[in-house]
Every structure is written in C-alpha cells, then in structure tokens.
Amino acid sequence: MTTTLLDLPTPAALLERPRLEANIARMQRRIAGLGVALRPHVKTAKCLEVATLQRAAGARGIAVSTLKEAETFFKAGFDDIVYAVALPPNKVPAAIALQRAGCDLKVIVDSLPAAQALVALAQLERVAMKVLIEIDSDGHRAGVKPDSDELVAIGRALHEGGMALAGVMTHAGASYDCTSATALVAMAEQERSRTVRAAERLRAAGLPCPVVSVGSTPTALTAEHLDGVTEVRAGVYAFFDLVMAGVGGEGVCRLDEIALSVLTTVIGHQADRGWILVDAGWMAMSRDRGTAVQAVDWGYGAVCARDGTPLAGLVLHGANQEHGIVQVDGGAGDATLAERFPVGSLLRILPNHACATAAQHEAYQVVDGERVTARWARFGGW
Amino acid sequence: MTTTLLDLPTPAALLERPRLEANIARMQRRIAGLGVALRPHVKTAKCLEVATLQRAAGARGIAVSTLKEAETFFKAGFDDIVYAVALPPNKVPAAIALQRAGCDLKVIVDSLPAAQALVALAQLERVAMKVLIEIDSDGHRAGVKPDSDELVAIGRALHEGGMALAGVMTHAGASYDCTSATALVAMAEQERSRTVRAAERLRAAGLPCPVVSVGSTPTALTAEHLDGVTEVRAGVYAFFDLVMAGVGGEGVCRLDEIALSVLTTVIGHQADRGWILVDAGWMAMSRDRGTAVQAVDWGYGAVCARDGTPLAGLVLHGANQEHGIVQVDGGAGDATLAERFPVGSLLRILPNHACATAAQHEAYQVVDGERVTARWARFGGW
C-alpha cells in the first residue's frame, strides 16, 4: 500500500527528497569547483540519512554543534568531526573520551584562558587534542581577531602545550544580514581573507596551520574564489528556507528549492477576519521570525497547497503553541474561506529557518510530491 | 554521592522543585477559593511527575494540546482529559480510539462544518463523543461568537446528532497582551461573562451545557469571581516565566517564583563589545521573544548566577543555535568580563516563555538550589 500525505498525522515535517538531493549536489559541485573540501554541518538535519547522502555526494567529514551530535554521528561511522562551538573546560572530558574512542575530533578555542584550560586538562590525561582557533571574521559572535596578539598567543599556548594545532576556522554569520548580492560577495571575500590572514600570521610565527576552514551557506554560494582556504562548512543548504530565499535581496535559493515544509490541517476559520486556523503553531514551526528583517516578511511561514505549490498572498501570520493563523491577503474579511479551505484540508508551510523548524520534530517524513517514501529519525538534546 | 549543578552537561533545563510546588499550591488555593475546579493544562510541562503533583494538590482532570499528550497521560492513569484544540476530521479516529479505550475525553469544535463532520464520523463508528464548543471570548484566535446563531446551530447539530454536548470552553489568550492590572481584571471578567452567556444561550435553546470552562494563567490569577463557571484551565502557572512576571504591567508572578531556568556555561567573551558567550542559544531557550512587547524586554532571557540569584543588568541579548550572547549593561566594552565570568562559569537563564523553552529539552533536572534531586522526562511530538 502506498503511503501518501493523507495518511500522516499533522503537523508533520516533510522532506522533499528530490529537492534535498539537488541541494546537496549543487553545493558539492560548487565547492568542489572552487577547489576545496566541503564539510557539511549536520546541525540542520541531525539525521544520519541526510549526512549519508552528503557523504555519498563527496563531502569530507562533518561539523557538529553539540557533543551529542559528535557522539551520535561517530557511532554511526562518521569519524572526521569538527565540534564547531568553543569548548569550555567542563566539556573537555567528553571530547577526550571521543578522541580516545578513535574519533578524529577537532575542537575549537577562541581565547587564551580557554586554550590554557584545555592544555592543562589534556596534559593531565596525556592526550594531544586537535584544536582549531576560531577567528572573528565579521564581528558577529565569537572568535579572536585575525590581527590580534591573542591569536598568536593562543597558537603558541596550544602548540607548546603539546596540542595538535590543526588550524583556523570562522563562520561569517553576519552574511545572514546582507541585503544585496554585492554585499554577500564582499562578505564572502572578507570571511576568506581575514581567515587566511590569521593562518598566515600563525605560520609566520612558526606555528602549524594546515586547516583553513570557513563557511556559511550564503557565503559558500557566493564566494568568487577561496584561495588559501582548505574547507567550507555549511549546513542549511541541504534544506534551504525562506531566509535563504531572501538573503542578499535576491536570495541564494528559490522557493521551489526549499526541501523542508510542515504539513498542517485546517482546523477552523474566522471568516470575518480573513483567518484560517491550522494545527501548525510554533511547536511545529518554531518561533523563528528570520524573515522579519528581510525585504519579504513571511510571518511564521509561506503557505502552500498540499502538493507544495505556493499559494500567493497566504502567510502563517500568527502562531500559538498548537494553533497557527493563516492570513489571507492582509486579513480582510472573506466569507468564502471555509469553501476554499474547508476544515480538514491539508496545507504545507515553508519555514523561515530550517534548522529551527526541523528541531521541533522527531522525524522527517520523506516525500516525493504527495507520496511518502520513508521516515527518517532525527535527534535533539545535548 | 550528591549530584550538583556542576555534574550536569550544559545547557540543561532546571526545575526548582520548591518553586514548582509553591506555584501549584498557589493556583489550586486560588481556584478552589473561587469555588470552581482546576484542570491543569499539561502542554507546558508535558511531564507525568508535574501532572501528578498537580493532581495531588487537588486538580481535577487535565487539558492537553495534542492527541499524543492525551494518549500518553491516559496510559499513565489520567483519564479525564479535555483536548483543547479544535478537532478536524482526520483526528476523529484517534479521538474515538481513546474514548473506546476508556478515556473520558472531551473534544472541541468551533464551527458548524466541523461539528457536522464529527457527527458523521462518530455515527459511522456508533460512538457518542463528548464535545465542548469553543467560544471566542476575546477575538484572539479560535472559537464561535457567544451571541452568534452559529453557536446554537452547532449545539443543535451535536445534540441531535447523538453526541454528548458537554458544554462550552474558551481561552482568553488576549490576556497576555494586557498592560495594566485593571485591564487584566476586565479581561478575566470578559472571558467569564461571554462564556457564561454562551452557556445560557445553549440552555435557553433547550440544549445541555453542564461544563463552562475558561482559562489562562493571567485571568485565572486576577478574576474577581467566576460565577457560572465550572472549571478553570491553566498551564504556565506551574513554571511561570518572564512574560508572566511582566503581564499586566506588574506581572502575576515575581522573578523568584519562576521555577524553570536553563543552566549554561560561559564559553567565551568579546570584551570590547561587553559580551559573554554562553552555550545556551535558541536551541536551549527557544526563539520566543514574548517580553519584546512588554515594558521590560528581557531579550532571550534574564541572566542569574548559578544559584539562581538574578544578575541585574545582564540579559541574553542574542541567540544563535548553540551560542547565546549575554550582554552587560547595554553592551559597553568591559575588560573585566573574563575575570568576573571566566570561561567555564555556570549561569542560569530565566525564559521568556516556559512552554517554548521547556519544549526544547528532553528532560528536567529537578533541583533544590544547587542540588540535583531527580531527572524527570518530558516528551514532544504529535
């Protein structure tokens, strides 16, 4: 018996496999074309099947955002892992345990105190941890400045402390705020040049720096060249989302490339207010409002027909825990709503931010149009 | 061996048991004092242990937001359940299955088409479902207007279709937007009076209406009387949160009554920007920004010391997936940050919205101050 969308309880996370595979192939082709390795960030999907497709397409290693991801993927045979969040002392024992179990784990520090604490703890355990220094290439979040004295001091502390200084890494998170294609290209170049600059300074100080790792989906898809870079990390490209469809003004994907959506059932109407009530609230979509600062604000999501065709003018305007409010054309009263979208109708909602929406679900219903072909588990927690 | 906060991986959801028990006792005392039954909404905690404490304190029955909650709590011995979201046709079979298994389930409809669909499906299965009609008491979301012709038409369709018309229910979600204590009291009275009015209209039409169910935490804690009401549903009161501490201007709880917090580790600094980086991002806190529209905007959360003491002037200003940015006093540069909050320090973050933050975690670490006394599982999904 064929399973279709009609057989699914709602809300449900749908993953369009043809789009997923096309997105994976696109990024792999692009990064290979720039002459560097692609290391997918598995924090978006947190799903073994997705990472397996990425590896089969040519990806080398993975990046993770939690040690639980590292442990889970390592157990499943992914042994080249960058834990891309700065490692505090209380997480060093778990990182050492992973390395001792045979995982080729690279950890991150971005300050001298953290480097010194890591050295002290690793020396006690007689382990040489592989360490990347996080570079602040955009003032967006974490990392040490590429021209700072602290960069070389960290490198020296790690190297002289017996750690394997693996190189430098950055994440140009500020790329999400770019409002033009030109700004995106410039951000990609800034990410590249500042990180390469940090690598050169370490090498000039006589320190090893084999890895130069950069990455964000917007910069990965717009960089004109990646001279001096050895690998790109990116995550959301596998699914894409509305933020990626709007980033840099014209976006780095089209709506019909977004692989993740939420299947929802119409549960009611407020015809006088132009509202359709659905069973996808923030529990199913997340509270992410990433498009609120973009040229096109999609509310909590873009509404599509059951088959995935966008319904122009319909957005998920409001979200309570298990109630979503779909608003029709600015919310004008509309007595025909119940006829056009009767209670029980199925709709799909494209998410603002795939990482956040996916995190609200325990599994993906893998679909090809209206046909459900598989259920892939995902995991959460720490 | 005693387990303390120092033994927990971070981020972790902490539940202060003394506060939880005091919050449960406070609401139970208040609602009993108003002469009606309290039906806790278990969507906030989704935790058997919490609901067990609520029952032990005197609560009667539970409200749920998903059929999975209904199924899980029914299996654990909670058999008086209101599924407080409108039931679309594709969920009727699961509701019937629960009732057949012995669950005293009440379902909700708020339109004539939904009532007719329910009647048709239930008649096919020869089951008399117990049904509440949802009343729109505040224009906030779902429900039928108390003075509408549709209300009586729905009642008649259910009653004449052989369903057990159990009564009316409402949720004054607009109470969350009240900015003064006076407005909250007025909203509570509006919620009560409009729902009672709906009940009276059904009875005047010769229809049964034994249950008159209202509820939201803010109105439950401010209603001056509940004449004509038979039960109050409320959920977030068990945990409270920053939104509840600010609702109606002066709030319905104090900061030191908030039972849920997220334990986080300092992972870095950007001293020139006055930032402390922590490992609680939106994955641990949710993207909820409920206090953004209140008099005091707490960003993604209020920062406390490890023991729970609020640290004045510190808020979780930014949140990426696994990075939080704590900002010190407006974000001015501060060279002493690393001394005051060294890498590896533990902090607690009080959440904007407990339902949303709790949903990001698989379990609660139950604590009494810095001592961890239990781990209570919670569940998600549909």
Image: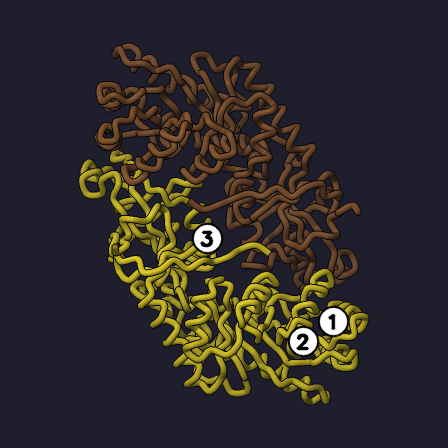
Chain colours: A brown, B yellow
Say what amino acid the circle numbered 2 marks.
Val
Q: Quadrant of residue B58?
A: bottom left
Q: Closest to the observer: B3 or B158? A: B3
Q: Dot 3 corresponds to which residue? A: B362
Q: Dot 1 corresponds to which residue? A: B115
Q: Closest to the observer: A178 or A9? A: A9
In the rendered structure, are the residues bearing label 1 and label 2 in contact, judged by CB atoms less than 8 Å apart?
yes
Q: Closest to the observer: A322 or A381? A: A381
As displayed, is residue B120 above or below residue A332? below
Q: Dot 2 corresponds to which residue? A: B131
Residue A183, visible in the rendered structure:
no
The mark lying in front, picked from 3 and 1, is 3
Say what amino acid the circle numbered 1 marks.
Ala
Q: Position of residue B234 (x, y in %)?
A: 48, 71
- Quadrant (top left, top right, bottom left, bottom right) of the C terminus of chain B: bottom right
Say what amino acid the circle numbered 3 marks.
Glu
Q: Position of residue A129 (x, y in %)?
A: 32, 26
Letter of the chain that mark 1 sits on in the rendering: B
Looking at marks 3 and 1 on the same chain, the residue that comes earlier in the sequence is marked by 1
Q: Quadrant of residue B200?
A: bottom right
Q: Position of residue B196 (x, y in %)?
A: 58, 83
Are both tags, 1 and 2, on one chain?
Answer: yes
Left-right relation of B76 to A104 = right
Q: CA distance from mark 3 to mark 1?
A: 36 Å
- Quadrant (top left, top right, bottom left, bottom right) of the N terminus of chain B: bottom left
Q: Position of residue A280 (x, y in %)?
A: 61, 54
SS at mark 2 in the image: strand
